[in-house]
Image (tube, rainbow, N blue to C red):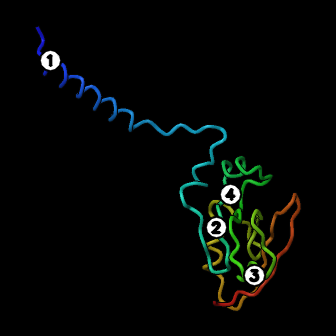
Amino acid sequence: MIKPRVIVIGIIVIALVAVLLLSFLPPRQTRHQAPEEAVTGTGISIDMGVTYLPVTKGVSRYYGLEVESGALVTEVIAGSLADQAGVQIGDVILSYNGVLLSKEVTLLGRMKACPVGSRIKLLVYRNNDTELVEFDHISR
């Protein structure tokens, strides 16, 4: 006859092994769930006064964008350079000073490479159209 103590220990060991194995499974993503890029805090705030998400295929699909690269503006800081120039939440910045943004060419990288005092020209996708937004890069 098996002792009750051995049975309890066996159940505990089985439960611990199950929990350990389940922790290695990837999280389940439903079709209504935001893509990982949108929820992991990868948005980047830069000195022109916007926070954005790099546009990937997943971000584009989730937000219903008709572009698959660029920088999706998620916040515009009131009174910032971008705000004064007319950048809006939901805009997708497609290019920075004529250089198309991509996985390899990021908005943050372009901003870091732009000296203070330069003119900034953003090609912005908004409401199924593109618009040129311009302002001077001044330090704040």
Q: Residue at x 43, y 36 (%)?
A: 25
Residue at image mark 4: 55
Q: Position of residue 13 (x, y in %)?
A: 23, 28
Q: Is residue 93 above or below residue 35?
A: below
Residue at image mark 3: 120
* Disc number for residue 15: none
Secondary structure under tag 2 reads loop
Q: Earlier in the sequence, mark 3 or mark 1?
A: 1
Q: Earlier in the sequence, mark 1 or mark 2?
A: 1
The CA distance from mark 3 to mark 4 is: 20 Å
Which is in the foreground here, disc 1 or disc 2?
A: 1
* Disc number for residue 106: 2
Q: Is residue 88 above or below residue 121?
A: above
Three-letter amino acid code of the residue under disc 3: Ile
Secondary structure under tag 3 reads strand
Three-letter amino acid code of the residue under disc 2: Thr
Quarter of the image containing the C terminus?
bottom right
The CA distance from mark 4 to mark 1 is: 58 Å
Residue at image mark 1: 4
Q: Residues within 10 Å of mark 1 (few under 14, many from 20)?
A: few
